[in-house]
Amino acid sequence: MRVLTDPAVTKISGFDLERIRKDFPVLSETAYGKPLVYLDNAATTQKPRSVIEALNEYYSGYNANIHRGVHYLSQKAGEAYDRVRVLVKDFIHAASEREIIFTRGTTESINLVAATFGRKYISAGDEIIISGMEHHSNIVPWQLLCEEKGAVLKVIPVLDNGELDLASFQKLIGDKTCLVSVVHTSNTLGTVNPVKEIIRIAHSRKIKVLVDAAQAMIHSTIDVQDLDCDFLAFSGHKMLGPTGTGVLYGKAGILEKLPPYQGGGEMIESVSFDKTTFADIPVRFEAGTPSIADVIGMGSAIGYLSTMDRKAAGMHEKFLLKEATAALEEIPGVRIIGNSPGKASVVSFVVDGLNALDIGMYLDTRGIAVRTGHHCTEPLMNRFGIPGTVRASFLFYNTGEEVRQLTESLKMAIQLLTKK
């Protein structure tokens, strides 16, 4: 396969697309006898060899439970696991590793905040604000909490180009608003929201803010202290790591006041039948045996990202998005949903008169992996009056040739499906 990238990017030291692709074994696979073109990165990213080897090394060399064992394997596993917390702290520029809670992913991180912050601070009549482009994971937990507490859920409208209506957001804030929970980067539209400004506005009214950074971590450099967010959630598998891993960042001063999330081992200080006292943060929120190997793998993913030229990678992704957008706009009947400036490398589109699923299934026969449907943003689809889209999401290891294959195969799909 010809590897095409932006000539400007190739001049930047440290970004070698051909070498990077070799780091990801699955990219050399075939699908139905054709070279795999993986454009479903917003759903999950592929894994570099270093992450795969980290998992294998743990299970073959020092598999053991952590923190309570005095033997060699337990000590080695515990040290490897604990190092990842420091890696995450440095990666997002948190003030302390005490602010880093390991979870199973963004979904659990948001549910943790809903269960703990919600239990302590949300009462009948209080208000929570989310946006109209949220993933279901940042809608349903708040709906459940509002139903339980008698609170009110408010929604920031989405403009026609896929941006949030900030003027409406400011009007939604009231004296009873307790929390704003908003996505950093839309998994469906690619919109990069002005979260720093949203946080500033909310904090001016003494309102806490949670940022869903599931899509942002792989495309952006996040500094939680610069953002000044109160909570930030993300998933390991969307940033080259294993599935079933994630992080909740929370300001220490807030976390220290929250009740436990789940009860069990590890999160306790002392247990008797009369009374249980709980461990300090972050362990207070991490009941039970964790996903040790996968957290270590997530650490390896962070290590991989930390050693690459993120600026060059971002430039290449912008090149891919620009090429894909221009090519799709030239195809009759294709309409891109979401055209906000500065968006991430995600393009969602519909084709007049055709079903997104049919298009996705045809592209699959050509070895091209895209996502179809509502992308767990069903209210957003309703906002645009469509049942779903075809979504192609690009990462730094994708190529310009893959963009060409996508658009050429889409033309073939339209021709074939229109005949039916």
Image: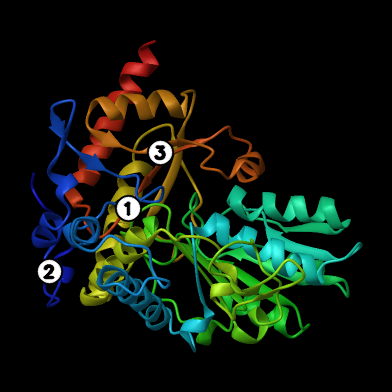
Marks 1 and 2 close (CB-CB < 8 Å): no
User: What residue lies at 44% left-to-right and 27% top-to-bottom?
Assistant: 357
Q: Earlier in the sequence, mark 3 or mark 2?
A: 2
How far apart are the alpha carbons under marks 1 and 2?
Answer: 23 Å
Task: Tell us which disc is closer to us: 1 or 2.
Answer: 1
In this picture, residue 354 sits left or right of residue 4: right
Q: Can you see residue 213?
A: no
Q: Which mark is residue 371?
A: 3
How far apart are the alpha carbons under marks 1 and 3?
Answer: 13 Å
Give the residue furthest to the right.
125
Give the residue furthest to the front.
273
Instruction: Please name the amino acid that badge 1 sits on.
Output: Thr
Q: Position of residue 410 (x, y in %)?
A: 31, 31
Front-most of residues 10 and 336: 10
In this picture, residue 327 sits left or right of residue 380: left
Give the residue furthest to the top.
420
Marks 1 and 3 close (CB-CB < 8 Å): no
- Vertical order, 65 against 338 (above or below): below
Q: Which mark is residue 10?
A: 2
Give the residue furthest to the bottom.
95
Front-most of residues 122 and 225: 122
Query: Which color scheme did the rendering employ for the protein?
Result: rainbow
Which image quadrant is residue 6 in?
Answer: bottom left
Q: Earlier in the sequence, mark 1 or mark 3?
A: 1
Instruction: Please name the amino acid that badge 3 sits on.
Output: Arg
Q: Give SS at disc 2.
A: helix
Q: Position of residue 322 (x, y in %)?
A: 32, 56
